[in-house]
Image: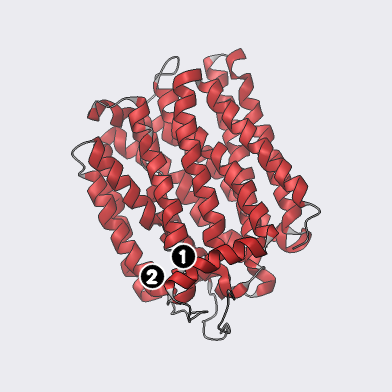
Amino acid sequence: MSTAPMTVNTTVHPTLSPALTFLLAGGTGLTVAALYYSQPTLGVLAGDLHASSRGVGWIPTLTQLGYAIGLLLLAPLGDRYDRRNIILVKAVILSAALLLTGFAPGLGVLLAASLLVGLFATVAQDIVPAAATLAPPEHRGKVVGTVMTGLLLGILLSRVVSGFVAEHFGWRSVFVAAAASVLLLAAVMARGLPRFVPTTTQSYPALLQSLASLWRAHRKLRLAALAQGLLALGFSAFWSTLAVMLHAAPFHLGSAVAGSFGLAGAVGALAAPFAGRLSDRRGAEWVTRIAATITVVSFALMLAMPLLSTGAQLALLALATVGFDLGVQASLISHQTIIYGIAPEARSRLNALLMTSVFVGMAAGGLLGAQSLAALGWMGVVGVAVIASVGALLVRMRAASTRD
């Protein structure tokens, strides 16, 4: 089956101005942040709902799983319909899902709402292909890197904000405020986003079938998805359990402190746009190998924590967070640069396949992290992250000789 029965029209979009780039970056950050507001609050949330750590561990897991499902089933629509309309509709529904989360009466409703938040937070992954479409080819890595900076800062700073707000105003206020902010974003984007010409006339079932064709046809896509999915597994295992670990002995720290580790991660994320520039100059595959190596070393450093004092453990955690966030995000930007060059007319579907793998990894990491923490303690979580990142590095080393 052909995956691109319609010629791409690349002449209808306006110039990608700094203001539009900022809007796209801000939009990705604010919408993807919805996935992570719960993580620093899990310790407080468990007490408020009288739930076990295993029970609340399903909140980030279902959110990430919903994101993966949404990427697979909803993101391909960006090739078939005007991306502007898709972005606006999904943003409004995301706002409603966040509001339901904030008013959830118990764990059951909260888990269902978390799944909905994940499904429609995929609007962030409608914005990234939009930026790649607007960008000139010779600067696509740089533009994707810039927009991804907004997404990465949204991921990391969401933890800082939610931790602070939850500690001072309660965890429910986090989600009510988030719902209001996404609704405001939708209003701004309604005025600022250009319209996009669809790149295919395929029906929805045909679009979904074409995902399998794209997956089979492009080995670079498969290797990119596997490597980034493994990195995401380790990333999620760490972040989905950090607040619970810090809430317990010997730290006894609140959600605000757990959220503040997002600032350390943000340092790494701010450096990640250089990956886009390096991808334009040195090649994206080279960058993925360097990024995976940095991630392995950063996670492995945490294996030394039992040998250190409490204060030194926190310092090492912060240092490792800078490193692995830099590695994971630089790898993601480079993998996106690789896949966007495969088939320009299918960017939404290619991005859907890559990011579905990422968020399956995220969901698996959340689940494995929670189970490892309960069974083996924090070193179990670190072990999961190290093994996953080593697997990603091996995939990238194997891909060094890959030709599509």
Tell me the quadrant of the picture where the N terminus can be found: bottom right
The local crowd at label 1, few if under 14, some if 14 to 19, many if 20 or more residues have their Cα within 10 Å, is many
| Colour pattern of the rendering | secondary structure
Question: Residue 353 is drawn in which quadrant?
Answer: bottom right
Q: Earlier in the sequence, mark 2 or mark 1?
A: 2
| Residue 316 pos. (x, y %) | 59, 26
| Residue 403 pos. (x, y %) | 78, 61
Q: Residue furthest front?
A: 1
> Left or right of 223: which side holds 48?
left
Tell me the quadrant of the picture where the C terminus can be found: bottom right
Q: Give the total of numbered labels.
A: 2
| Residue 205 pos. (x, y %) | 44, 70
Which residue carries the number 1 mark? 126
Q: Residue placed at 61% from the left, 25% from the top?
A: 302
- How far apart are the alpha carbons under marks 2 and 1? 8 Å
> Left or right of 124: which side holds 210?
right
Residue 284, relative to residue 385: is it above or below? below
Mark number displayed over residue 86: 2
Front residue of this view, candidates 399 and 333:
399
Residue 261 makes an appearance in the image:
no
The local crowd at label 2, few if under 14, some if 14 to 19, many if 20 or more residues have their Cα within 10 Å, is some
Q: Label 1 sits on what residue type?
A: Asp
Front residue of this view, candidates 36 and 64:
64
Q: Label 2 sits on what residue type?
A: Ile
Disc 2, SS? helix
Q: Residue placed at 53% from the left, 27% from the top?
A: 381
- Is there a contact, CB below 8 Å, between mark 2 and mark 1? yes
